[in-house]
Image (cartoon, coloured by chain):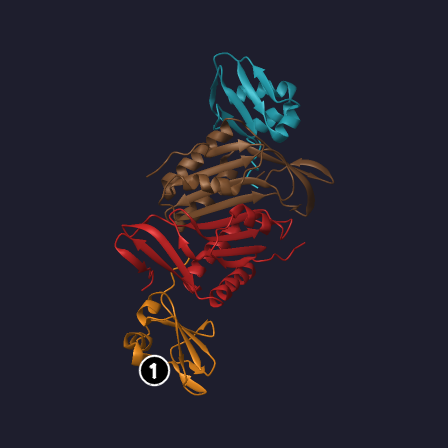
Chain colours: A red, B brown, C cyan, D orange
Amino acid sequence: MSTALESTIRIQREDFIVTDEIEAIKKASRNIGGIVTFLGTGRELSKGENITQLNFEHYPKMAEKKLEEIRQQAIRDYGIIEMIIIHRIGEIDIGENIVLIVAAGEHRKEAFKACEWAIAELKRTTPIWKRETTSKGEVWVQDTP
Amino acid sequence: MSTALESTIRIQREDFIVTDEIEAIKKASRNIGGIVTFLGTGRELSKGENITQLNFEHYPKMAEKKLEEIRQQAIRDYGIIEMIIIHRIGEIDIGENIVLIVAAGEHRKEAFKACEWAIAELKRTTPIWKRETTSKGEVWVQDTP
Amino acid sequence: MITVKYFASLRSLAGKEEDLFNLGSETTLERLSEEISKTAPKIGEMMRGKKVMISVNHEVVVPGAVIRDGDEVALLPPFSGGC
Amino acid sequence: MITVKYFASLRSLAGKEEDLFNLGSETTLERLSEEISKTAPKIGEMMRGKKVMISVNHEVVVPGAVIRDGDEVALLPPFSGGC
């Protein structure tokens, strides 16, 4: 028994509530036994600099398309039941939520694998950019120059 | 900056709220960048049988001691910042939360590794037992006879 | 006195949650298993056949372990926590 | 018309969010980079030197790709989403 979920992929300014997303994904099936969640949050330190604020921007349509591709490939390749991916944009303070990936499977192993793959794939393929504000000013982060 | 958290290890009858535990672990440090969560939930199917209810019991003191050992070893061996482990006991319905492990690290890699190791270690070393109720009756699960 | 605790399937088998045995100041698991056999022969046999994990004072021990007056011994069926 | 979108550091470099170019019904990224060089020589150079990823209609393309009238081209600095 599977139920299609609404809004499994979201890019949004507002914060999300992890419990709500977990309860949403549980509705996909009564046969979920393991749910693995990755939550990325704003760290204070980056390469020795003290960060005061983060700012994310995305390429609309393409970013959502890439997240949907990641979700579908995770379900297909890892045999999980469902995946939710949410990324925030705009201003984000230290300690605040940035990105959430929820992978629900019958067993934990595939859920761990799918979740870890999905966040790496998101960083690799999804057009989202981070700007860090430090005492020295603002800089766009280029993780892979 | 690290702050000691209260109740990082709990065995309890009542349900837990994932968001609350994540917000609690965030208080451990302003340098947390990745939080990996494993949530185990009650599946309807087990070895082809339809399960109507689960029931967990534990060996008080020893179970808590083992969870605390897992938490400390995860922090030490994987270099994560903090870990919370909660296991419910008593009657649990299908779809309900059973176990929660939250691993918070500076980066995601160590948090994934620590979380996946911790749930495997919990299953291996912690004296907790599951009884499944099906149409055929009640049976204690012996995963590794 | 030595306290013996039975959990999960072993509690059903023993028909009780715990037992008390007076076996002097120091004894062995082997000796304890013989005492247990008097009322629950199957459990004593499982202990001797290493079919059950045993903890003393909340730590798992090897079959030959010595136990002392005041110890808490627990008979632990295979664990099945986690999910 | 071909729409060109600039993101993140490239938007700062271009000083604008997007450009429109009329380059006929079919052209190449090479030709587009030369047009861009007229107002933003550094960006044109980055395109030719493969220092920037390029998408056409939301899919990343290889440097030699053909582009057509109506396409949306985006210049994408290295991604840094995720955390």
Front one among D27 and D60: D27
Query: Compared to D33, does C29 lie above or below?
Result: above
Quadrant showing the N terminus of chain D: bottom left
x and y percentages locating residue C51 in the rendered image: 57, 32
Dot 1 corresponds to which residue?
A: D35
Regarding residue B10, the answer to whether it shows in the image is: yes
How many numbered callouts?
A: 1
Instruction: Report x, y in % for residue A35.
Output: 54, 48
Seen at 51% across and 56% down, the residue is A85
- Is B14 positioned to the left or the right of A1 in the image? left
Is residue B127 visible to the viewer in this orientation of the structure?
Answer: no
Report helix, strand or loop for mark 1: helix
Q: Identify the residue at the far right of this view.
A: B135
The relative height of residue B31 versus residue C67 in the rendered view (above or below) is below
- On the image, the x and y values in percent for residue B68 come to 44, 33
- Amino acid type at mark 1: Glu
Q: Residue at x 52, y 52 (%)?
A: A102
Q: Return the chain for callout 1.
A: D
Q: Residue at x 48, y 19 (%)?
A: C67
Quadrant location of the C terminus of chain D?
bottom left
Determine whether, in the image, residue A61 is placed left or right of residue D10. right
**Above or below for D30 versus B75:** below
